[in-house]
């Protein structure tokens, strides 16, 4: 009880409320602009949050993370262009409904579904906290090593049809995290006698290059598109009635979002994919999917909005980020010497509860904001893309230069920007590099830390937790290879 | 099953990747240390070697797959054209680095205004309204980050030539 009261003390601070407001409204706006997305915004804002109080910094970023997908549904439904990559599935049924003069219904359905997913996952998070608080301290070095390995393997195999290049990029990310001075014998690794490589590649520099600068370059070298705006007719609550009608789909999709969010390395895409397929399989009219089925929008939006809160579980409990956005947030924790992991639940439980309460309010503010401000948000979609590119490039400077006021950092950032540009042009994934970099570093540390208790290789998996995670790894790999083999047999 | 359709540019990409991986493999003995008498797991060389080996393994299989697909659908002319298109953003990277170079000299405010203004013109937005929007956006970014959030950006050398009161004001806020 004391912890909850103490968390309210944090949560009721005026500056936390300002952070909630800026994060949630800002996140919706960022999400509604095609070509920006939460990853770009969070990467740019990260260094600015370092000077803030940890709860303020994290709340702003959490606000953007939790609300961007709400906003991303608007262009997905109205102009067939997802605001954030995870809204892509919403275009299938959302845009079809718009073409059938049901834009308002589709939009409000997306809002209410997102809200359901968001709130459901926060309750799941609160409900699981006591369990996490009990289990998290049991995690030792070997268990965290296995969990990080599971995250990396899942990142690779969840990139369906791109597993080979995802594997390469994960190892590439792991490799760049080794460059510089290592911490055991203090020797240089891959510095080629260049003093600027001694401190290695900074995560923020790489993040900004791969996400923000690359996106700016894509926009600057592209063309502006004329966006015709459909009219929004109908009541604000049409979607709510639709959601009540398909409540089972909403419940299944939100649950799927929570489950997928908890598993490191999986995230929104698989959550949506599974819930969309389940919704189609239980629908009485499966043929409508892709042609304007309300259940399709519910499945996609409820699932992807349930992920952010759930993705905080491995981050907070084990210090293991499940995807790029939580990897970015991890750096904010480290800067403020709040180390996510088992200790956080023992020593800073009020901070954790404060985050949950902020997440809850973020969802409510976003919902109210969207119900009244959608028409104004439509203008944002019409910002010329190339001008957006100039703005992102200008903002990227703030992100990278404020780290150390270093010209070299900016050159590195530009280099990773070009790499990200090429990967995006080739339709290759970027996230594996970031997770490889973050999880690779964790793995190397835990691998070394666990050596005192290792006599044979089996000692890595002879603990109940590490053994269970290892079993999950084996099952995940077996399923993956079985699916690959089945598809291979089908083709040949 | 991996993607079967061939994406133009993939061949060039895997060639670059293979060169990079080969270079890193060759560099391992020169760029990492091996200490006699300490366990394998504490060797500084172990982890980078593991990562590069993983890179080599995946890139090799991926290259074979790309080559198979290229043989069916690829054309060298398209590859070279794609390579050319990768150079397209270099122009903007140069502008970006010039902007970074200019900030410690001309100050954050002036550099940002110039950067936004020139880039807006370069992108073909020549209307008065667009140029004003561009300058207002630049000014807004400086005010939000430097004046309000107080992010650490070195003040411009140019500010030292301003009268005393103005000089301090600009150094702190712009």
Image (tube, coloured by chain):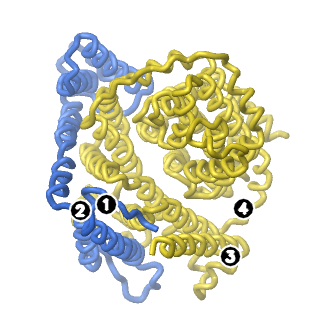
SS at mark 1 in the image:
loop
Distance, label 3 to label 1, CA atoms, is: 40 Å
Query: What residue sits 66% from the left and 21% below the top?
Result: A368
Question: Residue A306, percent across and down?
Answer: 66, 43
Distance, label 4 to label 2, CA atoms, is: 54 Å
Q: Earlier in the sequence, mark 2 or mark 1?
A: 1
Q: Which residue is mark 3?
A: A467
Tag 3 and tag 4 share a subunit: yes
Query: What residue sits 28% from the left and 51% below the top?
Result: A422
- Chain name for mark 2: B
Query: What residue sits 61% from the left and 20% below the top?
Result: A369
Question: Residue A307, percent across and down?
Answer: 62, 46
Q: Are marks 3 and 4 in contact (CB under 8 Å)?
A: no
Q: Are marks 3 and 2 in contact (CB under 8 Å)?
A: no
Q: Colour of chain B?
A: blue
Residue reaching furthest to the top = B128
Tag 3 and tag 2 share a subunit: no
Circle nearer the viewer, 4 or 2? 2
SS at mark 4 in the image:
helix
Q: Which residue is mark 4?
A: A137
Q: Residues within 10 Å of mark 3 (few under 14, many from 20)?
A: some
Distance, label 3 to label 4, CA atoms, is: 17 Å
SS at mark 2 in the image:
loop
Q: Are marks 4 and 2 in contact (CB under 8 Å)?
A: no
The C terminus of chain B appears in which quarter of the rendering? top left
Question: Residue A206, percent across and down?
Answer: 36, 50
Tag 2 and tag 1 share a subunit: yes
Labelled disc at residue B74:
2
The quarter of the picture where residue B89 lies is top left
Tag 4 and tag 1 share a subunit: no
Q: Does A170 sit above or below residue A260?
A: below
Q: Which residue is mark 1?
A: B6
């Amino acid at each position: 009880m004391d912890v909850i009261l103490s968390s309210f003390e944090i949560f009721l601070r005026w500056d936390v409320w300002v952070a909630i407001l800026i994060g949630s409204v800002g996140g919706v706006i960022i999400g509604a602009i095609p070509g920006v997305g939460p990853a770009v915004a969070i990467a740019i804002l990260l260094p600015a949050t370092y000077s803030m109080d940890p709860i303020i910094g994290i709340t702003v970023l959490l606000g953007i993370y939790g609300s961007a997908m709400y906003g991303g549904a608007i262009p997905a439904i109205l102009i067939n262009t997802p605001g954030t990559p995870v809204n892509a599935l919403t275009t299938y049924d959302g845009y079809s409904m718009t073409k059938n003069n049901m834009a308002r219904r589709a939009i409000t359905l997306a809002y209410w579904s997102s809200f359901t997913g968001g709130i459901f996952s926060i309750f799941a998070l609160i409900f699981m906290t006591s369990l996490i608080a009990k289990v998290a301290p049991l995690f030792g070095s070997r268990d965290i090593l296995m969990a990080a390995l599971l995250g990396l393997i899942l990142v690779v195999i969840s990139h369906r049809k791109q597993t080979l290049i995802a594997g390469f990029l994960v190892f590439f990310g792991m490799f760049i995290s080794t460059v510089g001075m290592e911490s055991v014998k203090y020797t240089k690794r891959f510095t080629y006698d260049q003093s600027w490589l001694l401190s290695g590649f900074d995560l923020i520099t790489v993040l900004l290059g791969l996400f923000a600068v690359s996106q700016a370059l894509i926009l600057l070298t592209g063309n502006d598109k004329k966006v015709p705006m459909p009219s929004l007719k109908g009541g604000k609550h049409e979607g709510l009635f639709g959601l009540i009608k398909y409540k089972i789909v909403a419940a299944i999709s939100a649950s799927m979002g929570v489950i997928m969010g908890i598993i490191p390395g999986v995230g929104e895409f698989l959550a949506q994919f599974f819930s969309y397929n389940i919704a189609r399989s239980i629908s009485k009219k499966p043929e409508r999917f892709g042609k304007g089925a309300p259940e399709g929008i519910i499945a996609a939006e409820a699932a992807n909005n349930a992920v952010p809160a759930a993705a905080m579980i491995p981050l907070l409990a084990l210090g293991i980020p499940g995807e790029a956005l939580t990897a970015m947030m991890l750096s904010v924790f480290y800067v403020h010497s709040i180390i996510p992991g088992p200790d956080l639940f023992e020593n800073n439980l009020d901070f954790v509860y404060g985050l949950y309460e902020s997440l809850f309010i973020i969802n409510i503010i976003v919902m109210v904001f969207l119900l009244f401000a959608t028409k104004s948000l439509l203008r944002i979609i019409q910002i010329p893309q190339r001008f957006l590119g100039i703005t992102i490039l200008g903002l990227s400077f703030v992100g990278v230069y404020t780290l150390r006021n270093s010209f070299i950092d900016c050159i590195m950032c530009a280099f990773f920007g070009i790499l990200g540009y090429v990967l995006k042009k080739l339709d290759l994934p970027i996230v594996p590099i970031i997770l490889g970099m973050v999880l690779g570093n964790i793995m190397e540390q835990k691998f070394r830390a666990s050596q005192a208790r290792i006599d044979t290789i089996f000692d890595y998996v002879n603990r109940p937790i590490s053994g269970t995670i290892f079993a999950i790894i084996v099952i995940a790999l077996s399923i993956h290879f079985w699916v690959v083999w089945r598809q291979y047999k089908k083709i040949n | 099953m991996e993607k079967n359709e061939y994406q133009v540019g993939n061949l060039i990409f895997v060639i670059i990747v293979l060169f990079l991986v080969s270079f890193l493999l060759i560099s391992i003995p020169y760029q990492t240390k091996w200490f006699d008498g300490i366990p394998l797991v504490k060797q500084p060389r172990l982890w980078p070697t593991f990562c590069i080996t993983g890179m080599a393994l995946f890139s090799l299989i991926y290259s074979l797959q790309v080559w198979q697909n290229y043989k069916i659908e690829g054309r060298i002319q398209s590859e070279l054209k794609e390579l050319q298109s990768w150079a397209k953003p270099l122009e903007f990277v140069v502008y970006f680095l010039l902007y970074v170079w200019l900030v410690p000299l001309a100050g954050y405010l002036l550099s940002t205004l110039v950067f936004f203004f020139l880039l807006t013109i370069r992108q073909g937005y020549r209307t008065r309204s667009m140029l004003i929007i561009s300058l207002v956006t630049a000014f807004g970014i400086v005010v939000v980050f430097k004046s309000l959030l107080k992010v650490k950006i070195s003040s411009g050398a140019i500010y030292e030539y301003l009268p005393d009161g103005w000089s301090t004001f600009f150094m702190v806020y712009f």
